[in-house]
Amino acid sequence: MAGHHVVPFKTNLMTFIALVALTIITVLTAKFVNLGDWNLALAMVIATIKVICVLLWFMHLKYDGMVNRVIFISSFFFLALFFTMSFFDLYYR
């Protein structure tokens, strides 16, 4: 059985700096950039990039085996299934 992967402090620091920078970019674009209906899409793209950073480096999915990745990705499938079923339940009432 493999041991835990220890991420260097520099990697954690760079990830933290990237997350803070992306948060600042999100706030600045929300305040100063008017894209109309695309403001939400831009915010979601930036949030998705932040989620990927957290998942890969802070949650160590980059260094885990394929089983953990499959389990994590399948959770999104079941979440989408739950949302779809809830949508149809509310829409066709």
Image (cartoon, helix red, strand yellow):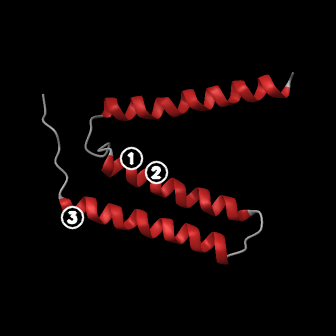
Residue 66: which quarter of the image?
Answer: top left
Which badge, 3 or 1, comes first in the chain's sequence?
3
**Circles 2 and 1 in contact, beta carbons < 8 Å:** yes
Query: What's the distance in space between the residues labelled 3 and 1, CA to CA?
Result: 17 Å
- Identified at 30% across, 65% down, the residue is 14
Q: Up-down: is 50 above or below 75?
A: below
Which residue carries the number 2 mark? 51
Give the amino acid at mark 1: Leu
Q: Sequence-wise, which precedes: disc 2 or disc 3?
A: 3
Q: Quadrant of residue 61?
A: top left
Asked whether, in this view, residue 42 is left or right of residue 11, the answer is right
Sort mark 1 into few (<14), some (14-19) or many (20+) by Cα contacts within 10 Å.
Answer: some
Instruction: Please give left or right for residue 23 compared with residue 88 in the image.
Output: left
Q: State which quarter of the image contains the N terminus.
A: top left
Question: At numbered mark 1, what does the secondary structure look like: helix, strand or loop?
Answer: helix
Q: Quadrant of the C terminus?
A: top right
Q: Amino acid at mark 3?
A: Lys
**Residue picked out by circle 3:** 10
Query: What percent of the width, then of the height, locates residue 32?
Result: 66, 78
- At a point 61% along the width and 32% down the height, the residue shown is 80
- Residue under label 1: 55
Residue 71 spot, x, y in % from top left: 40, 29
Per the model, the C-alpha gap separating discs 2 and 1 is: 6 Å
Disc 2 marks a residue whose amino acid type is: Val
Residue 93, relative to residue 13: is it above or below?
above
Residue 23 spot, x, y in % from top left: 49, 65
